[in-house]
Image (tube, rainbow, N blue to C red):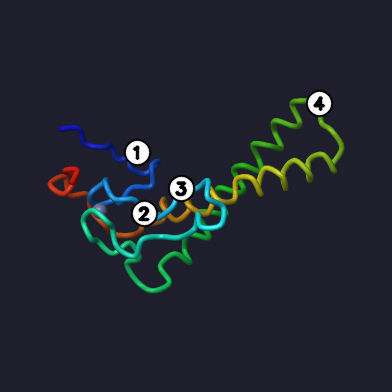
């Protein structure tokens, strides 16, 4: 019986309790609905919003992701020949727009995993 690892479940956006049910209802590629979440896990039924307003804290995770991407792009552009500041601004805005659906989802997933208080239960991870 194969069980999904902690990091694989986090990267695939699976429920932190059973690691089987998806946290989000649609794939990230659907730009109009990428942000829709399941209220409860479709596999084990755990509430995926532990308390009202829980995901406001995910903003801080998203901010950290944004800063990490911004610094990485800045270093890469600098090493590629230090172009004008407008190139920095344009590339950073473009990349942040492209990554914003992923940023939104992973900030919520990471916040749920780290601060959601939901423990992994291996007995719930059998596929239905
Ligand atoms: Zn679950």
What residue is shown at x 56% (from left), y 52% (from top)? 31
Q: How far apart are marks 1 and 2 (CA)?
A: 15 Å
Q: Name the residue under label 3.
A: 27
Most distant residue in the left direction:
123
Q: Quadrant of residue 118?
A: bottom left
Q: In this view, does 91 lie to the left or right of 106?
A: right
**SS at badge 1:** helix
Crowding near the residue tagged with mark 3, few <14, some 14–19, many ≥20 C-alpha atoms within 10 Å:
few
Q: Name the residue under label 1.
A: 7
**SS at badge 3:** loop
User: Quarter holding the N terminus?
Assistant: top left
Q: Mark 2 points at which residue?
A: 23
Q: Mark 4 points at which residue?
A: 81
Q: In this view, does 22 lie to the left or right of 67?
A: left
Q: Point out the frontmost of discs 2 and 4.
A: 2
What residue is shown at x 29% (from left), y 63% (from top)? 40
């Amino acid at each position: 019986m194969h069980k999904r690892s902690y990091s694989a479940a986090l990267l695939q956006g699976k429920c932190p309790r059973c690691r089987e049910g998806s946290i989000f209802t649609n794939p990230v590629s659907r730009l109009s609905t990428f942000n829709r979440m399941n209220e409860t896990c479709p596999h084990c039924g755990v509430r995926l919003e532990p308390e009202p307003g829980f995901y406001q804290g995910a903003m801080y995770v998203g901010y950290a992701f944004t800063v990490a991407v911004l610094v990485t792009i800045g270093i890469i552009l600098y090493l590629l020949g230090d172009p004008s500041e407008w190139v920095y601004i344009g590339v950073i805005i473009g990349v942040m727009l492209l990554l914003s659906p992923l940023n939104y989802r992973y900030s919520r997933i990471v916040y749920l995993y780290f601060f959601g208080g939901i423990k992994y239960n291996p007995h719930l991870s059998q596929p239905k």
